[in-house]
Image: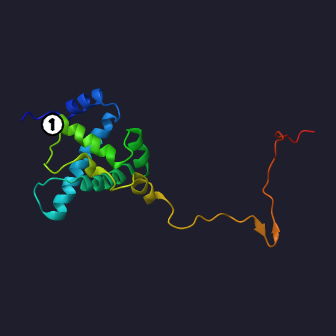
Amino acid sequence: MHKVKFDEAVATICKADKRYKPDAYFFLRDTLDYTVKELRADELIEHRHVTGRELLNGLRDYAINELGIMAYPVLESWGVTCGRDIGEMVYNLIQVEAFGKSEDDHPTDFEGWMSFDEAFRNPYRPTRPVLVPSLEIADDPVEPLTRGNKPATTSEA
């Protein structure tokens, strides 16, 4: 089997399928490397197949580590907004022989495991109620200062 250079594989895919930016594929490759490394550390296994769910969990952890609060908007700018997008990208890479596949793999393996909103936005949402300053002093409500629709004036008169 001929091993395809990853950057050539991505260029071929992006010519035919414009849904995802090239950077998304390179980030996916880095995510796979990160996930394999994490699985090896946890399981002491030299090499084994990574499932769709494991790759999505790896994506969540890697994206938050690398991109922080910008993970969701960056992924979205690359066209990646859900697990199905990751599955489509993986299968695009499989078709050009840049990624391997087992007999049990299927594109739907990436669906329904993770909400990108929860995975990438929830870690940065407040965990306690946001305090809003009160505009009341004693029992008298204080009106906020406003100019209304009048233009600003100077003190020259």
Q: Quadrant of the C terminus?
A: top right
Q: Residue at x 33, y 49 (%)?
A: 83
> Which residue is situated farthest in the top direction here?
15
Name the amino acid, label 1: Glu
Looking at this view, is 50 or 88 the one in front? 88
Relative height, residue 13 to residue 133 (above, below):
above
Looking at this view, is 64 or 87 the one in front? 87
Q: Residue at x 8, y 33 (%)?
A: 2
Q: Quadrant of the N terminus?
A: top left
Relative height, residue 57 to residue 28 (above, below):
below
Judging from the image, what secondary structure is the residue with disc 1 in?
loop
Q: Which residue is mark 1?
A: 97
> Which residue is situated farthest in the left direction here?
1
Q: Quadrant of residue 100?
A: top left
Image x and y of residue 91, in percent: 23, 41
Image x and y of residue 125, in percent: 49, 59
Is 154 left, or right, of 88 in this rendering? right
Count the numbered circles shown.
1
Q: Quadrant of residue 54?
A: bottom left
Looking at this view, is 89 or 105 the one in front? 105
